[in-house]
Amino acid sequence: MQDIDVKSLETAFQDRIDQEIKIEPRDWMPEDYRKNLIRQISQHAHSEVVGMLPEKNWLTRAPTLKRKMALLAKIQDEGGHGLYLYSAAETLGVSREEMVRDLLSGKAKYASIFNYPALNWADMGVIGWLVDGAAIVNQVALQRTSYGPYSRAMIRICKEESFHQRQGYDICLQLARGSDEQKRMLQDAINRWWWPVLMMFGPHDSASAHSAQSMKWKIKRVSNDGLRQKFVDQTVPQLEFLKMTAPDPQLKWNEERGHYDFGEIDWDEFWNVVKGVGPCNKRRLAVRNKAHDDGAWVREAANAYAQKNN
Ligand code: BYC
């Protein structure tokens, strides 16, 4: 009897999804839907928080006050995105403490891209342009995700991300119009970030463990390869406008497909970074742990205030 009830709940749940009706926190949902969402949303939140670190290092070395203000605002936005996303995940019954603990212990994943170093000022342009650009392609699709709180967080995040992408491209434009040395710096940054950015979209669809179910539940609206292709197609004209090149001899417009062809990603490198042995994994976690420890007094003060006012 109970089995029949669960079956009919599952059918009604899928019907709602198929009709594009958002799932809200108090609605019945399959346990795997809930778990999969907690996994994706918390990883997304961690990515926003860890993603502040490579850019933070350049705040004190920004070339002008204007650049410093824009970068500072962007980094603060990323922290805010993390908070919207932790809140969205909390509506699924996981506590923020648990999520933060998993990040700090190294148990939880976050986007591979943030385990690469930011070596010079051109990297600030390229991170804004390419990393935020790739994130936007994904997040625009996620605005239509089936879980209401995640979808609404994405709508707000996308508005801010487009400013981030433009501030990055503006830095790149200035370098591209600058001295030969500035042009070389920009090309070097593009060469280093191009492939890691393409990895942000995850493994090929055929190797993606969660895609089939996530697409059926409309947690994901476009597949990993679909998003990657969209990103390449929209980025190459921007690259050409800068008169720069991508480090991929196979990057070429394919008239028949109506898309750019591009070379194969180094998947060994991707999985190594995901598994914790990328260039900066250890450093990122150490800095994040230190920031958490240094902030203990803020949490204590906030808790004391909350208790006093209860
Ligand atoms: N890095 O089955 P798959 C930002 C993992 S931050 C690390 O395809 P899924 C910004 C994946 O988790 C924006 N791990 O997974 C912030 C899974 O492992 P588990 C970040 C990756 O979830 C500051 C396994 O590989 N955006 O914009 O269906 C400054 C198999 O993959 C990665 C988001 O988080 C990766 N790149 O699809 C500047 C978007 N790729 O969990 C900018 C939300 C895959 O089974 N997330 N893995 O242990 C998503 O859309 C999806 O989670 C993904 C992967 C498309 C990333």
Image (tube, helix red, strand yellow):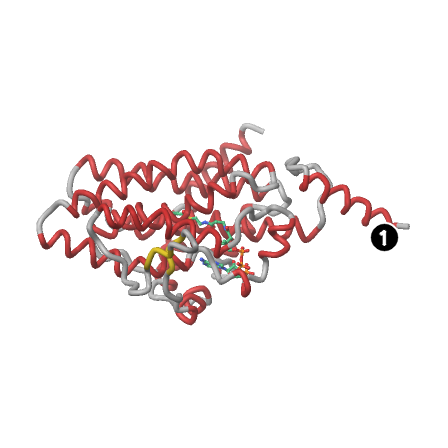
Q: Which residue is depicted at the point 58% across and 62% down?
A: 209
Name the kind of residue labelled 1 in the image: Asp
Q: Quadrant of residue 115?
A: bottom left
Most extreme residue toward the bottom is: 268
Asked whether the viewer can see residue 104, the reply is: no
- Taking depth in this image into account, of 145 and 36 the one nearest to the observer is 145
The mark total stands at 1
As drawn, which residue projects farthest toward the right?
1
User: Residue at (39%, 66%) from the top-left corner?
Assistant: 264
> Left or right of 188: which side holds 134?
right
Report whether 253 appears left or right of 190. Answer: right
Image point 39% across, 69% down: which residue? Answer: 266
Residue 260 in percent (x, y) is at 37, 55
Q: Position of residue 41 (x, y in %)?
A: 54, 48
State whether residue 161 appears in this view.
yes
Provide the residue designation for mark 1: 3
Q: Residue at x 50, y 52 (%)?
A: 43
Looking at the image, is 180 positioned above or below residue 78? below
Residue 286 higher or lower than 155, as above or below: below
